[in-house]
Amino acid sequence: MSWLDFESQHVWHPYASMLNPGPVYPVKRAEGVFLEFEDGTRVIDGMSSWWCAIHGYNVPELNAALLEQSSKMSHVMFGGLTHKPAAELAKRLLSLAPANMSHVFFSDSGSVSVEVAIKMALQYWQAKSCPEKHRLLTIRSGYHGDTFGAMSVCDPESGMHHLFSGVLAQQLFADRPAATNDDEWDESQIAAFESRIKTHHHELAAVILEPIVQGAGGMRFYAPEFLRRVRLLCDEYDVLLIIDEIATGFGRTGTMFACEQAGINPDIMCVGKALTGGYLSLAATLCSAAVCGGIHADSNDEQSGVLMHGPTFMANPLACAVAVASIDLLLASAWQQRVLDIEVQLKEELEPCRGFDSVADVRVKGAIGVLEMKESVDVANVQRLLIEQGVWLRPFGKLLYTMPPFVIRPAQLGTLTSAMKQVCGQI
């Protein structure tokens, strides 16, 4: 039995069935923006490996950081010990994050960073003797991860986790705003959210939002003004604001963090995905001094002041060292111009798809290009057609979209958008 036959019979893939699995393509090597399959086929990766490989693959600077750190220490427990890569990474994150962020908690995945953010919010109010503030408010079409706390704030109807709705914590949801930019803004955009927070603030620990761009819940964009108004409402009604920058952080939308486009400071912020440039799984939850101080407020509880979380691979030295190198590489590059150039090209080359009978909408933000179809996409068939065009994308639902590496060249991006247009004409 070949390794691929064994794998197909025994190894689960994301959101897949073992009884009726879809096709998978064995990758032998990745270089630059290309994936090379075992049969020699080369495709441009328009997904950045689920949005994290912003520098592409086999990056010399990141390879060197990984090699150097592995010769010193691959892992050491973070309980009672520490190391320089963690401190260096925290320093860089705080220098880039909104000005009020002052503390960093490392974890091993984006979903877990959301769990930590939720725990921070809950413990903050418990320490303030307000245990009744234990629920979360968000907007529909959101996605925050696959663990239980994160699932509870994903869209309960159109999201991927409705099977678990009966056992998840019951959170509160408001309609998402229809306005995609500030030019379209009017007061009706905030009405549903304002009503929710006004009615339920006494039981709300926090609001959690993906800033400006909602990712796996539907690749939808909303006006920065909505985020500004949410910040004001959270202040007015004494509710913490958690911003989930896992998908949007590190330049994807054109600014280092998407919340910068609204000019707001969150109380808690989650980062992940592109943090290590796609090399290793790592995430972080940042918080303000006020949140940290609140958690440490005096209490009769013997666990007072102790944030109740501690992953085994927390602040893994290899991951931290690569993340430091990835951030340094990003800052040393012309990343803002690159993302702007990608945005301009995506708009120009995808906009004609709006005229196709199969396409309901075309939207572009930073290095994100989305074609929303009128009907659900046959993933296996569409991927086969794309591979024939030399492109790798991973559609879902009604969406055919791309979030390419920032290092993609115009001709390579043109190949990608051309394939997307051709596929749209065939479905």
Image (spheres, grey):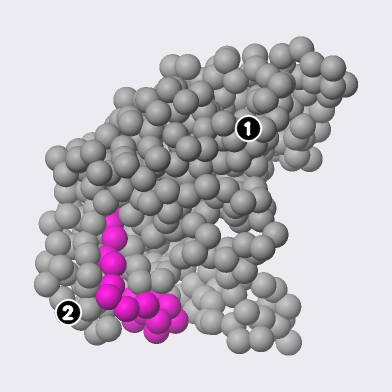
Stretch of the chain drawn in magenta: 367-387
Q: Could you tell me which quadrant the C terminus lies in?
A: bottom left
Q: Could you tell me which quadrant the N terminus lies in?
A: bottom right
Disc 1 residue type (three-letter): Lys
Q: Is residue 257 magenta?
A: no
The answer to whether 257 is drawn above or below residue 1 in the figure is: above
Q: Residues within 10 Å of mark 2 (few under 14, many from 20)?
A: few
Residue receiving disc 1: 133
Q: Position of residue 171 (x, y in %)?
A: 57, 48
Q: Secondary structure at mark 2?
A: loop
Camera-nearest residue between 64 and 137: 137
The answer to whether 301 is drawn above or below residue 198 in the figure is: above
Viewer can see residue 343: yes
Residue displayed at 60% across by 54% down? 151
Residue receiving disc 2: 357
Q: Residues within 10 Å of mark 1 (few under 14, many from 20)?
A: many
Residue displayed at 23% across by 56% down? 363
